[in-house]
Each structure stands twice: as C-alpha cells, then as structure tokens.
Image (spheres, rainbow, N blue to C red):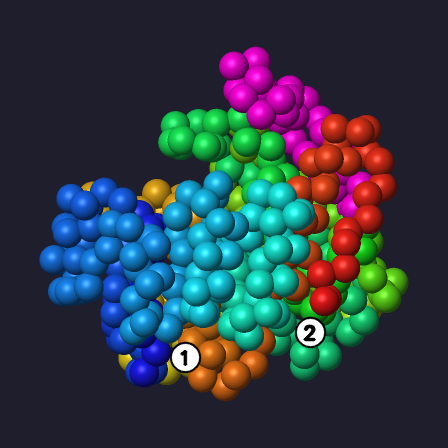
Amino acid sequence: MINIAIVGLGFGAEFIPIYQRHPNTNMYAICQRNVEKLNEIGDAYGIEKRYSNYDELLADPNVDAVHINSPIPNHAEQSLKALRAGKHVACTVPMATSVEDCLEIVKACKESGKKYMMMETVVYSREFLFVKELYETGELGKVQFLKASHQQDMDGWPDYWPGLPPMHYATHCVGPVAGLLKLEADYVSCFGSGTIREELAKIHNSPFAVESAHIKFKDSDLSAYVYRSLFDVARQYRESFEVYGDKKSFEWQLIEDEQPVIHTAKKPEPEIPEKVTVPDYARLLPAEIAGFTTKGVYDADEQQHLSFTQGGGHGGSHPHMVHEFVSAIIDDRDPFPNAAQSANWTSVGILAHESALQGGKLIKLPDFNL
C-alpha cells in the first residue's frame, strides 16, 4: 500500500475518493494552507493526517508520494522539494513556468530515483484512448499529421489566470499530439494573433488573443499544429485533437455533446465521413475505481469544481491517471508522461510564447533525456 498525500484541495479534492478506493493506495494525508478548508475536507472524507505546512508534510517519513494540485506558480518549487525529500511526485499541469525549472525537475527525478508524472488529463481521456486504440490496431494506417486546440474563456478565474499567455498553459493540446506516437518535440514556431484588453495584456506583457504554433518532432517526418485562446475570443470551451492517417482520420466535433467523425479513405465521397460514439475505457481500470470515469467525485451541483464542469469531466481521465501513477511506482517503471516527456510538452508552450513575441522565430527545445 502506497501512502498518498494530496497537496491543494480545490481541484485536488476530486482525487481523494479515487485514492481511497484504489486497491494499492492509502489516502494518508492532505495539505492545504487554509486550515478551515483543510479541516472541512478532512472531516468530509475521514482523513486524519492533515498539514497546513508543506515542509512539515514532506518531513513525514510515512508519506510515499505527493499529488500536487496547487496553483501553477507553485508547481516547480513543490515538485523539487518533494523529489529531494525522497517522495514520488504526481503534479497537475503544467510542470513549471520556465524551461530552467523543467530541467531542474528532470535532474532531481534522476538524482532521487523517484517517479515524476505530470497529470495530463487529455492523454487519459476516453477520446485519446479511443484514437490510441485505432492507431495501435493499425486502423489509422500511417499517421500523417496531428492537430489540437484548447480554447476557453477564463474571465472570472482567480489569481494568476488573468492575462496569462495562451501558450503558457498548452499541455492539454501539446500532450495528445506528442503523446499518441510518443514523439519528442524538436523545435517550435508560433504566431500571436489579435489583442486582448489592455488591462489584461499589461499583467504579463502578453497582448495576443490567440497563439498558434507548429511543432516539428525529432527523428520523425511528422509535425503538428496547436492553437490556444484564453480571453476575448468567442468560443465554447473546447479541448480537441485530430489525427490524420492514410487509412482513417479522426476529427473532433465542433460543438460539445455532438459526435466526433471518422473519415475512411477510398470510400465513395459521401460515405467517407461517419459519426462515431467514443466508448468508455473503465475496463482498463481496477473495478474499485472504474466508476469514476463517468461520475464526478462531487455529485452535488453546488460542489462541482469549475475545472471539472467546464472541462466536460476531463474525459473520464482522473482514475486512469491515478492508476498509471500508482502502477508505475509498484512496477518500478517510468509513468507516462515521465519527467522528460512532461518537460518537453511543457516547454513547447513556454518556448512557443517566446517565438510569438519574436514574430514566429524557430526555437529549438533542449534535450531533457539526461
């Protein structure tokens, strides 16, 4: 049994019952600076071990692994502290806010011998698992191109979100295009388009309403196109990815609650597209946590966390991510994505924004495979 500590109890509370029910984990401790919130969650889920100080949590020898769900600016520092304290780390996206910090986490992971997994929801969503199955069974044929988007209206979100450069939160669209074939981004070119309100633009000195990037993959004939928007763009929430093969292609639906489309080559033109129902992949999970692919942890409407409701339930990914993290620790193998992959995906977005500020300049990614 692995003793898990969850850090940050907004979005993080979503994972408590999953760890409580997983056959190989003990939901050991929770950590939150706000003591009132800490006790409220602790009481609700019957968790005795509670910390309002992160360093005190890390000093607890009974903690085997931490699952970090704190605000983005804290991810790198908290991941590094945990790895250096000898704890396995799962961390919500993105890995860090600088390429330098991404590199530091990869080094700390290697030096400590502990596991690091960025909890990228999209690569464990039912849509991704469906396309992965099409690829692995050969139905797509040779993959020729990949494309993804993440558009969201972030007005009204707290703290560090206002004015955030779109590509600084790019892993939801970089993850699937890199992750399907386990490709490594080699270099990136990105353009900014449009402008956001001046009071938002001045916060991060980032004027762009939309950032769109091309990614060239290392040791591959493939490239991918990804685009992001966060403010002042009229669009329903959409996390999409599309894959074009020589036998079949998968295209995301334009509107939520519609069906994606499979295009099959060499059919009569009217028969090429076909709407498909994406199945659930709960069968890949231990029975104890399989129910969480279709049911939110907070069932009452007034308790639904904004990222879960607005994110369409993250495609049923939460129990899959937990199971991958736990299995990697038990099997003593790298999780997917591991530290180097997480650093690569995160740095694509960071460097894409740098490219946009320089008019689309090609920027090469560092090698994270230390």
Instruction: Tell me the SS state at disc 2.
Output: helix
Among the 4 quarters of the image, the one containing residue 144: bottom right
Whether residue 171 is situated above or below residue 278 in the rendered picture:
above
- Mark 2 crowdedness (10 Å alpha carbons): few <14, some 14-19, many ≥20: many
Give the residue at mark 1.
Answer: 285
Q: Residue at x 65, y 74 (%)?
A: 134
Q: In the image, residue 294 lies at what x, y percent?
A: 35, 65
- 148 in magenta: no
**As shown in the figure, which amino acid type bears the numbered disc 1?**
Leu
Horizontal side, residue 116 vs residue 347: left or right: left
Q: Which of disc 2 and disc 1 is earlier in sequence?
A: 2
Relative to 277, say whether 290 is above or below: below
Q: Secondary structure at mark 1?
A: loop
| Magenta-colored span | 188-214
Of residues 237 and 69, the one drawn nearer to the viewer in this rendering: 69
The quarter holding residue 235 reads top right
Residue at position x 57%, y 67% in the image: 109
Visible in this render: residue 168?
yes
Determine if the magenta segment contains residue 189: yes
